[in-house]
Image (cartoon, helix red, strand yellow):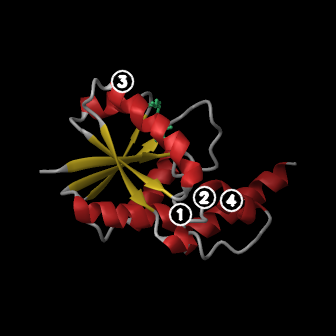
Amino acid sequence: MKRAVYPGSFDPMTYGHLDIIRRASEIFDILIVSVLNNKPKTPLFSVEERVKILEEATKDLPNVKVDSFSGLLSNYAAENNLHVAVRGLRAITDFEYELQLAQGNRKLSDGHLDTVFLTTSLEYAYLSSSSVKEIASFGGDVSHAVPEYVASQMYEKFKQMKGMD
Ligand code: PNS
């Protein structure tokens, strides 16, 4: 059984992430999409909300499971007997950070955790969770980037935040 983990912040999941998930789920027998529970960052969506969004988006993919983790990815991988991490590469600008992450994970895992890169499909290569959040915060159209139920949750969150000003 070939298992892999696709770790990320997924704040929120975009069609770019979903594209990587779909393609990786065809390569691996089991794909675990795992949301980083990173306290120092202030995410727009809670871990529970991000997990729920991913579960909804992947409900037609039976070999995809959604989980969350905190701390080091290498520790999470070791605890769950996972030896492959999947990451998407959109452009050369992603490369330096991704290389560092991949090398760091190999080092921290004593060579037990390797990273496999999938190049993001061209139609999603411009997407990032941050730009989607910025567009949504100004009430712009994000239907090209996220499913409708994610867009409406984002608009609602920004509406509430503006109400607090
Ligand atoms: O979606 P992102 O924010 O680009 O994902 C980054 C992620 C979650 C893959 C990365 O930040 C991560 O694995 N963090 C966990 C902490 C860790 O293991 N750091 C050491 C990396 S060498």
Real-space Cα distance between discs 4 and 1? 11 Å
**The furthest residue to the right:** 165
Q: Is residue 23 left or right of residue 7?
A: left
Amino acid residing under circle 3:
Leu
- Residue 142 in sight from this viewpoint: yes
Alpha-carbon neighbours of circle 4 within 10 Å: few (<14), some, or many (≥20)?
A: few
Q: What residue is pinned by disc 1?
A: 14
Mark 3 to mark 2 CA distance (whole Å):
27 Å
Query: In the image, what residue occupies the spot 75% across and 71% down?
Result: 140
In this figure, which residue is indicated by the disc labeled 2? 128
Question: In the picture, residue 41 is in which quadrant?
Answer: top right
In the displayed structure, 82 sits above or below 133; it is: above
Q: Secondary structure at mark 4?
A: helix
Q: Would you place residue 97 above or below residue 3 in this image?
A: above
Residue drawn at point x = 58 percent, y = 70 percent = 145
Name which of mark 3 and mark 2 comes first in the sequence. Answer: 3
The residue wearing badge 3 is 108
Q: Is mark 3 within 8 Å of ligand 1?
A: yes
Mark toward the viewer: 3 or 4: 3
Q: Circles 2 and 4: CB distance less than 8 Å?
A: yes
Residue at the disc numbered 4: 131
Circle 1 or circle 2, nearest the eye: 2
Q: Are marks 1 and 2 in contact (CB under 8 Å)?
A: yes
- Discs 4, 1 touching: Cβ within 8 Å: no
Q: Label 2 vs label 4: CA separation? A: 5 Å
Q: Is residue 64 left or right of residue 95?
A: left
Residue 146: x, y in percent? 56, 69
Give the quadrant of residue 102: top left
Instruction: Give the distance between the C-alpha atoms of the residues marked 3 and 1, in whole angstroms.
Output: 29 Å
Looking at the image, is mark 4 or mark 1 earlier in the sequence? 1
Looking at numbered disc 4 in the image, what kind of residue is underneath it? Answer: Ser
The amino acid marked with disc number 2 is Ser
